[in-house]
């Protein structure tokens, strides 16, 4: 199972110091389309969204239907959305190379998210490259073999994954590394970051657990711990390229940290960061991850479920996200373009006014919006407040700086009219 992207980011954006937004309207076409080619996978990962199974589902999209799906993706226009083939394990489909080749012929930037299984050979990776794949993503959830293999449910997965990482890089493929954060794995983050730095990766995607599928049984971080980890990821951003999955409030953290840095205010006190932050910060300092050569920081991209992002299941059902099990249509009977642009679920998810609770009252709601998947998994309401966010609307004191930063991010030239800070705060 993959995270939300295994693709390079070749298309134009408005770029700011803090948050990026798409040049085109997210209501018109998605930035990325994820297709779950199959749920078949020999692994038994503890967090698996798909609750993957050993054998393929006979109701999966056929080769012809999969080609039709890619043709529909191309119909969104130029630039076409990025197209990621995920699973399960995509290598369980014997037509994988045919589909990658056809997608490439259609002008799609095709990426693949394979599982760490014996099918992930150097030759298979070379075949993907020759068929037109630009990038792959691999999952690494712990810094050592025993812990990673235990999380994935099969011995030897760590060795297969790290070998594939080396082979893919050697073959000229770009590699994204996906890491799932749980209470059990969080202390491995600094040591995984060292591997990202030393081995090289296009991007590190850190996934914050959503309690769906097998992930319901795992212990995720609470809201305060999530804040601590998001701030650690910000600290690492000048050393390695990092993004978050299902932690959209990372965009808020980036805005806050930029403002605090500009003002010379220590973040640890201003944001009330806790013991987990202090522990992880000590570790990344000890590992030399906050010194030495710096790289341009990668600002997070303003994309979320149904808002620049769409997921198509192995049976052709269309969802705003793979972690949000609410179907809005079916590509076997409807056009993906129509579902994405017009389905009530998708249009509602693109409307910040639909947000409730703290998210609805938050001055960051247009740039963040919270994880709709986590809100739904915890409360049953897709518009409920983000359960893993500790921020209290109106509590960040630097109003003038914040208005300027939100305007630069595309959230509106005067967001003060839409949030409770309009009459207060420190300028």
Image (cartoon, rainbow, N blue to C red):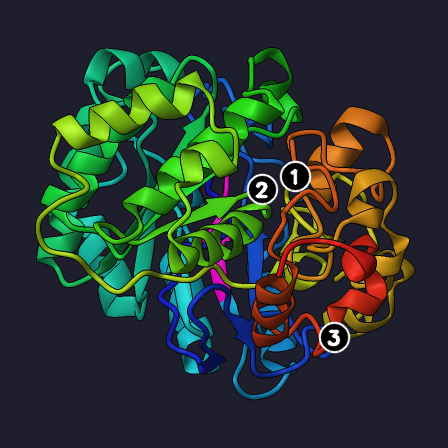
The magenta-colored residue range is 83-88
Percent x, y of residue 299: 42, 62
Give the residue number, with chain letter if any, for mark 2. Answer: 246
Of residue 166 and residue 306, the one placed in the foreground of this image is 306
Percent x, y of residue 146: 24, 11
Marks 3/1: CA–CA distance: 33 Å
Give the residue number, with chain letter if any, for mark 1. Answer: 323
Q: Is residue 51 left or right of residue 87?
A: right
Dot placed on the residue nearer the N-terminal end, 3 or 1: 1
Give the residue number, with chain letter if any, for mark 3. Answer: 414
Marks 2/1: CA–CA distance: 9 Å
**Picture residue at 67% right of the left edge, 76% below the top:** 29
Percent x, y of residue 242: 35, 49
Q: In this rendering, does residue 204 appear at all? A: yes
Q: Is residue 379 left or right of residue 426?
A: right
Percent x, y of residue 38: 54, 42
Mark 2 touches mark 1? (CB < 8 Å): yes
């Amino acid at each position: 199972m993959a995270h939300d992207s295994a693709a390079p980011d070749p298309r134009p954006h408005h770029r700011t110091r803090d948050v990026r937004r798409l040049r085109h309207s997210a209501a018109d076409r998605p930035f990325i389309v994820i297709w779950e080619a199959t749920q078949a996978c020999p692994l038994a990962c503890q967090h698996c969204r798909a609750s993957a199974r050993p054998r393929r589902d006979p109701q999966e999209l056929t080769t012809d239907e999969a080609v039709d799906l890619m043709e529909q993706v191309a119909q969104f226009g130029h630039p076409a959305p990025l197209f990621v083939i995920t699973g399960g394990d995509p290598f369980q489909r014997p037509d994988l190379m045919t589909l990658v080749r056809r997608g490439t012929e259609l002008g799609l930037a095709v990426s693949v998210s394979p599982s760490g299984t014996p099918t992930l050979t150097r030759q298979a990776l070379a075949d993907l490259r020759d068929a037109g794949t630009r990038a792959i993503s691999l999952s690494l959830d712990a810094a050592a073999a025993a812990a990673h293999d235990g999380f994935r449910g099969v011995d030897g997965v760590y060795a297969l994954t790290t070998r594939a990482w080396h082979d893919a890089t050697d073959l000229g493929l770009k590699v994204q590394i996906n890491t799932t954060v749980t209470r059990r794995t969080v202390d491995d983050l600094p040591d995984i970051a060292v591997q990202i730095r030393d081995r090289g990766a296009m991007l590190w995607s850190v996934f914050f657990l959503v309690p769906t599928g097998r992930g319901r049984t795992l212990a995720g971080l609470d809201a305060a711990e999530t804040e601590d980890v998001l701030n650690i990821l910000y600290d690492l951003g000048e050393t390695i390229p990092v993004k978050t999955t299902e932690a959209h409030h990372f965009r808020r953290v980036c805005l806050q940290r930029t403002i605090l840095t500009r003002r010379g205010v220590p973040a640890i006190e201003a944001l009330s960061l806790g013991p987990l932050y202090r522990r992880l910060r000590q570790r990344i300092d000890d590992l030399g991850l906050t010194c030495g050569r710096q790289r341009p920081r990668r600002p997070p991209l303003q994309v979320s479920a149904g808002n620049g992002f769409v997921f198509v299941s192995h049976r052709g059902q269309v969802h705003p996200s793979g972690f949000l099990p609410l179907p809005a249509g079916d590509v076997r009977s409807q056009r993906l373009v129509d579902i994405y642009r017009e389905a009530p679920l998708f249009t509602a998810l693109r409307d910040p006014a639909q947000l409730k609770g703290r998210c609805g009252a938050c001055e960051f709601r247009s740039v963040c919006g919270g994880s709709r998947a986590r809100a739904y998994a915890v409360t049953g309401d897709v518009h409920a407040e983000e359960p893993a966010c500790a921020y209290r609307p109106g509590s960040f004191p630097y109003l003038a700086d914040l208005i300027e930063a939100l305007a630069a991010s595309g959230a509106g030239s005067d967001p003060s009219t839409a949030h409770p800070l309009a009459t207060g705060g420190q300028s």
